[in-house]
Amino acid sequence: MVSRLDRGSVANWWWTIDRAILAACLVLIGIGIVASFAASPGQTHRINIADSFHFAKLHIRYILPALVLMVAVSFFSPRNIRRLCLLSLAATLVLLVLVRLNGVEIKGAWRWIDLGFATIQPSEFMKPAFVVVAGWLFAQQNKSGKMSGYIAPFLLYCLCAVLLVIEPDVGQTILISAAWGALFFLAGVPWAVVFVLLGCATAGAFGAYTALPHVRGRIDSFLTGEDGFQIRMASDAIVRGGWFGQGPGEGTIKGGIPDGHTDFVFSVVAEEYGIILCMIIVALFAFIVIRSLYIAMKEQDAFTRFSTAGIAVLFGMQSVINIAVNLGLMPPKGMTLPFISYGGSSLVAIGLTMGCLLALTRRRPEARKSALLQT
């Protein structure tokens, strides 16, 4: 046990960290490992890999550094979180440019870059860095009170969105747009500006539908139901699982879902472990988001408040989109489920994201008291 009298860095971390959010993250990590063992056999059989637990082993290999990164980053102060994210954003923006120039093309999209020792997806690491830096820019505007202060976060959003669209990666664009829009709303802009932005978002969605054939194809197929093979398989798996599931290793539909270990892992979990476990997963995601927003609401420092809220929205939206696709409520987006889906870049990046969230939500009564005295 760590004594309250201990003034070391570990003891200080333990008594200031939000242990409820940390525990929820650890439970999701555990569920993700179980889900990887459920999904791996079907996928390895489908693509003729001899080792049935190939993807489960890779999942564990990536989740361990993600866990270490999450804990390590949670030790940072808000100032160091800002510095880390500024550096990360600069690096990932460079990588996003390189991805389009010399990246790895998969299924018509350039989202990955080969660094020699590893292949990474820069957009995954760009998301948390973008949200924190945008939160800092909105906090600067909040201090100045000038409308011109919105120019910098707007230009930053445009730059990141353009780099994502040209990959193309509409799913990640939707995520950063939702997080940025939430920050813009929290910054206290007039309602007229909010409606203008909503109009721009609608125009952007229509533009993506008309200009990007793969987006138009997915939406049309979803609306007509002509090419919803994966969604139908996922829905059948959820229905077959019932409340308590078919049991570990007893799922049969999972082998026919092409992305059962990534985008559709939620349906694999439903088939083998039932709707009850899926409801627990949803409750854990909801708890993390609601508690983070509650802490942000009480925070006096504008940067910490905006960044915490932005990360919570980012995390929540990614979860909602993935689950909605599995339930057949949205067309496929290629969106992973945080901590649950397989994916090296995705797992490590979510570790970074939640490390930032844990660092920003740590209890700092002295800082909050001084902030109150200054107002």
Image (tube, rainbow, N blue to C red):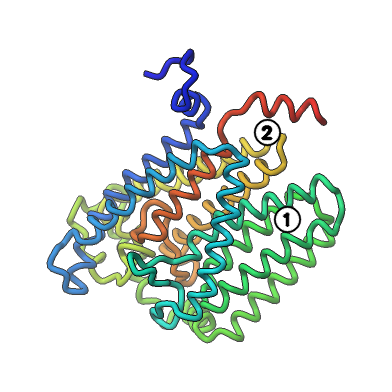
Residue 16 location in percent, x, y? 53, 27
Question: Which tag, 1 or 2, sits closer to the chain's start?
Answer: 1
Where residue 228 is drawn, which disc sits there? Answer: none
Q: Quadrant of the N terminus?
A: top left
Residue 150 location in percent, x, y? 79, 58
Find disc 1 in the rendering and name its residue: 184
Q: Is residue 190 visible?
A: yes
Relative to 52, say whether 243 is above or below.
above
Q: In this view, which residue lies farthest toward the left? A: 50
Residue 312 location in percent, x, y? 57, 48
- Residue at 21% over, 59% down: 251
Compared across the picture, whether 65 is left or right of 252 comes to: right
Could you say whether the residue bearing mark 1 is in a helix, strand or loop? helix
The kind of residue tagged 1 is Phe
Quadrant for residue 148, please give it. Answer: bottom right
Q: In terms of depth relative to the viewer, which is nearer, 351 or 174?
A: 351
Find disc 2 in the rendering and name its residue: 298
